């Protein structure tokens, strides 16, 4: 089941973001989203079951914040969002491990050990607040960098 989130009051930031060059705007969004998503990834790592026999190559160590998906994750994402042309996406979760969803939701012979949903539930307000608070700062910093670069190119 998809969760929809609506944030009111970001129209001014959206306009300011639109004034930046497209690549700069995407970088601003990526930095902000990465920072906002990191507490969720940290909480997921804390809640994920750890197998000491794997030597660090396990579910817990695979959890990350990234713009990339595995080949399989990418194909599933395209099926769900094939008509969505979102400019920037950040993903938080386990790497391409076949057992990740079994840990989260369980299997007939193995009960669920949820780690992703509790991490999101505990941090979703913080994620939204970080986006709201930091996006404006990132836009201002990017605009200053662009102005400085333009002034340097002129003089």
Image (spheres, rainbow, N blue to C red):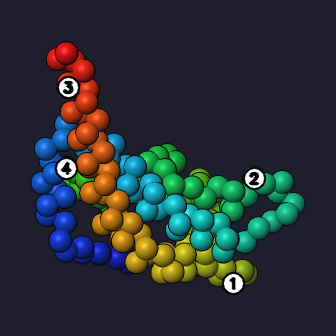
Q: Position of residue 136 (x, y in %)?
A: 27, 57
Q: Nearer the viewer, residue 123 or 71?
A: 123
Q: Residues within 10 Å of mark 1 (few under 14, many from 20)?
A: few
In this rendering, the label closer to the viewer, 3 or 1: 3
* Residue shown at 67% from the left, 71% from the top: 46
In this rendering, the label closer to the viewer, 3 or 4: 3
Residue denoted by label 2: 57
- The number of callouts visible is 4
- Does residue 77 appear anywhere in the picture? no
Residue 150's disc is: 3
Q: Is residue 142 left or right of residue 64?
A: left
Find out whether the residues at labels 2 and 1 contact each other: C-beta distance under 8 Å. Answer: no
Q: Position of residue 108 (x, y in %)?
A: 67, 82
* Residue shown at 43% from the left, 73% from the top: 126
**Badge 4 element:** helix
Which of the two discs, 2 and 3, labels the residue nearer the N terminus?
2
Residue denoted by label 1: 111
Distance from label 3 to label 1 (Cα)?
59 Å
**Badge 3 element:** helix
- In the image as oriented, which residue stretches furthest toward the front? 155
Distance from label 2 to label 3 (Cα)?
47 Å
Which of the two discs, 4 and 1, labels the residue nearer the N terminus?
4
Distance from label 2 to label 1 (Cα)?
22 Å
In this rendering, the label closer to the viewer, 4 or 2: 4
Residue denoted by label 4: 17
**Badge 2 element:** loop
Find out whether the residues at labels 2 and 3 contact each other: C-beta distance under 8 Å. Answer: no
């Amino acid at each position: 089941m998809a969760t929809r989130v609506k944030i009111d009051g970001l129209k001014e930031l959206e306009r300011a973001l639109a004034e930046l060059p497209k690549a700069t705007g995407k970088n601003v969004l990526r930095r902000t989203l990465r920072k906002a998503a990191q507490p969720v990834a940290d909480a997921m790592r804390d809640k994920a079951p750890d197998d000491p026999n794997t030597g660090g190559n396990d579910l817990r160590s695979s959890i990350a914040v990234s713009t990339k998906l595995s080949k399989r994750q990418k194909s599933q994402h395209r099926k769900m969002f094939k008509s969505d042309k979102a400019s920037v996406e950040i993903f938080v979760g386990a790497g391409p491990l076949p057992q990740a969803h079994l840990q989260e939701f369980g299997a007939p012979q193995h009960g669920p050990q949820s780690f992703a949903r509790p991490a999101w539930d505990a941090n979703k307000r913080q994620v939204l607040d970080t986006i709201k608070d930091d996006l404006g700062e990132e836009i201002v910093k990017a605009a200053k960098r662009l102005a400085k670069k333009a002034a340097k190119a002129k003089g």
